[in-house]
Image (cartoon, rainbow, N blue to C red):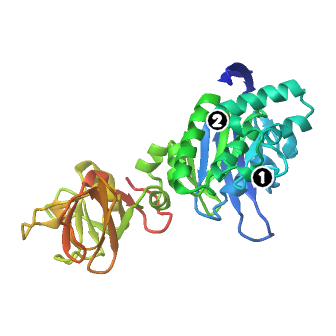
Amino acid sequence: MSRQVLLFGDMLSHPMADIRLESVTKSYASGGANAVNGVSLTVADGSFTVLVGPSGCGKSTTLRMVAGLEDITSGEIAIGGQRVNDVPPKDRDIAMVFQNYALYPHMTVRQNLGFALKMRKVAKAEIQRRVDGVAQTLGITELLDRKPGQLSGGQRQRVAVGRAIVREPKAFLFDEPLSNLDARLRVSTRAELKALHQRLRTTTLYVTHDQEEAMTLGDQVVVMSNGRIQQAGPPLEIYRKPANRFVAGFLGTPPMNFLEGELNQPGGHEKQLFMADARNLVDERFGLAFTAAQSDALKPFQGQRVVIGFRPHALSVTSDQQEGREFSDSNEFVLELLVVEPLGDTMDLICQTAGGERIVARVAATDGLNAGTTIRLAIDPSRLHVFEPGEFGKALL
């Protein structure tokens, strides 16, 4: 079965190629911790899946096992329905783009683009047709006679991507391909990569440590830590409904705020309350009230220790300085304003509780907020997250 895609003005046939991992494990030493631990994942045909996580989480090792550059300790890997555990990398019909580009410095761009095809003894006319088509698509036609040393970082990256495309593989594998580019070029290049994928629709597995890059590129985002998948799904779903505290804290800029405390329900109060360990500047402890629906969902956890999470965007500055209000009802608290970071239309307010815990609010830019003063913040209760205690505590709502 094949899929037709519009590429370089011609209709080219690409084989269907999903990537499936079943309980894949990688161990480097007997009795040691596994670099990858029981990973099961499906990269749908034509999709763009991003593996993201901190250094050492196992994402690059997973990618290298799919490529055949690392042997797997146990489990199964299939590409296009074919088991590839024992298939050499050259026979897996995949193309990989590395962080360091890996271009041949003594060859021109044209020669770099066509080298893999030449090694496969593809006809010269076909090599020229494919190379010219790729160069036109990537906007590097005028660079074909230059050598890598004469190119900028962004141009070399385009050539590396072009060298993968020209092979017309079943799947693309990207290993942190933008990490050597400066911040502005990374933004423009990732937009080009996304547009290119939307045109080619070639199955893509992409590795990055940059959560913003993962969110903007992926149809599916796979968050990894300690060699395990913590959560996989569409980027907005993971952002809005993180499965555990680690995912919640890893995705999002600035990171999610967390407060520890316990759930209780004071006599005569219909709503569940969260009483934080942290202290308000004008109150002994934070008290946050949930919505009615949240309160019902949290009843089984009455009296238990939990962690509350809320993103900086869920906070707002209130000018209401009325004294004597019940903070548990108003979901407002007074903090010390340590730093104001203007960001154009928005600003980040870095605040501190009486006990020294940091809370960051991202709000609309406004004048009159000065470091060293106190500030009253309000939180939208519908945007509260609740987790079990611990780094990987699961979501309770």
- Spot occupied by residue 88 in the image (x, y as percentages of width and height): 88, 45
- Is 307 placed above or below 357 here? above
Question: Residue at the spot x=61%, y=29% of the render?
Answer: 199
Q: Is residue 45 visible?
A: no
Q: Is residue 7 left or right of residue 331?
A: right
Q: Residue 19 location, x and y as percent? A: 71, 39
* Extreme residue in the top direction: 11
Residue at 52% over, 48% down? 187
The vertical placement of 345 against 6, above or below, is below
User: Is residue 88 or residue 11 the one in the foreground?
Assistant: 11
Q: Quadrant of the N terminus?
A: top right
Q: Residue furthest bottom?
A: 355
Out of 387 and 322, give the one closest to the viewer: 322
**Vertical side of 349 occupied by 102: above or below:** above
Residue topped by disc 1: 102
Q: Amino acid at mark 2?
A: Gly
Task: Give the secondary structure at mark 1.
Answer: loop
Q: Label 2: few (<14), some or many (≥20) within 10 Å?
A: few
Q: Secondary structure at mark 2?
A: loop
Residue denoted by label 2: 139
Quarter holding residue 352: bottom left
Any mark on residue 346, and which? none
Which numbered disc flags the more N-terminal residue, 1 or 2? 1
The x, y position of residue 63, in whole percent, is 71, 51
Q: Residue type at mark 1: give it.
A: Ala
Q: Between residues 177 and 203, which one lies in front from this camera angle?
A: 177
- Marks 1 and 2 sit apart, C-alpha to C-alpha, by 20 Å
Residue at horizontal 78 percent and vertical 47 percent from the top: 147
